Amino acid sequence: MRPKTKKILGVYTFIMFLFFYVPIIVLMVYSFNDSKTGTTWTGFTFDWYTQLFSNGQILSATQNSLFIAVVTTVISAIIGTLAALALHRYEFPGKKFFDFLFYIPVVIPHVVVAVALLSLYGWLDVTLGTTTVIPGHVALTTSYVIFVVMARLVRFDSSIEEAAKDLGANGWHTFWRVTFPLIFPAILAGSLLVFTISLDEFNISYFTAGPGSDTLPVLVYSMVRQGISPEINALSTIMILLIVIGVVAAGKGMGSSKQK
């Protein structure tokens, strides 16, 4: 690579870094701002975080988000792992079609899924609430578990399973004692991705949650419409930290699965 080209790429990378991360850094810094307007710096304080954890509406939205994310993660992990095993190990009619089908939730706009679910609930006369959000999140995130687990299964040495069977282990014991421990890092990585995506999902939650079932992204949206305050900055900072922790943990899980 020419020195001039390398320099241009370095400058471009630095500009993109500023474009993506400076607003986040400013948001996090101003979450400690003593000013109520959140536009001018007047001093350092933890008051907004204290108020945040004593706000019943925010605590309720946090509880809803965590409940939805945990249930979505469990369901998506189970369905995604079983689907990945089926697609990798078995031949059946329509396999390529199902393989293609799992890519659709990744590329289709989330708002389309949300409107489709809302129409379905209306047709079935289902009362909207916290639980009506979960099917949409599961439909949206299961594919991520499939992709991560499939990537691990492609590099899986089937001779290990054959050796276990030669030693007298049946199919059930072979799976739980040999297969599952080896693919578990991939399952964990996919589950953590699902958790962070579900926690951050807005469109499906906005359309399919009933009254009193707001999630954190929906609550932040409603609060921002009334003006940005340090309390919103504090809430956004906590959400960012949770998502970063989840993504880092998922990355380590995928790295561990590659090493094995």
Image: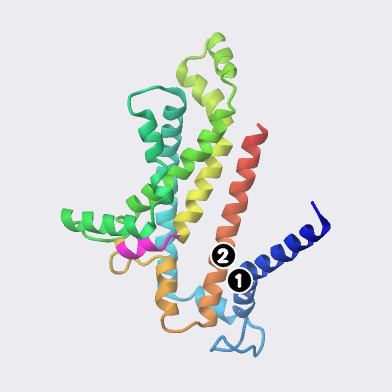
> Could you say where residue 208 lies in the image, as x and y percent from the top left?
30, 61
Q: Which residue does the image show at 19% across and 58% down from the upper left?
A: 122
Which of the 4 image quarters holds residue 213? bottom left
| Range of residues picked out in magenta | 201-207
Q: Quadrant of the C terminus?
A: top right
Q: Check the image and report above or below for 55 versus 156.
A: below
According to the picture, the residue beneath numbered tag 2 turns out to be: 240
Question: Marks 1/2: CA distance?
Answer: 9 Å
Residue at 28 percent of width and 69 percent of height: 211
Mark 2 residue element: helix
125 with respect to 46 (left or right): left
Q: Position of residue 85 (x, y in %)?
A: 45, 29
Q: How is the image coloured?
A: rainbow
Q: Is residue 206 magenta?
A: yes
* Kind of residue at disc 1: Ile
Question: What is the chief secondary structure element of the magenta stretch?
Answer: helix
Query: In the rendered structure, does residue 192 fall within the stretch colored magenta?
Result: no
Above or below, 155 against 216 in this view is above
Q: Position of residue 207 (x, y in %)?
A: 31, 63
Report x, y in % for residue 127: 21, 60
Whether residue 119 is visible: yes
**Is residue 72 visible to us here?**
no
Going by the numbered disc 2, the residue's amino acid type is Ile
- Specify the label residue 192 is tagged with: none
**As drawn, 251 above or below 18:** above
Question: Residue placed at 56% from the left, 19% from the top?
Answer: 158
Q: Nearer the viewer, mark 1 or mark 2?
A: 1
Do the residues under discs 1 and 2 have CB atoms within 8 angstroms? yes
> On the picture, is 240 further left or further right than 140?
right
Looking at the rendering, which quadrant does residue 217 occupy? bottom left
Q: Residues within 10 Å of mark 1 (few under 14, many from 20)?
A: some
Instruction: Identify the residue position indicated by label 1 in the image.
Output: 24
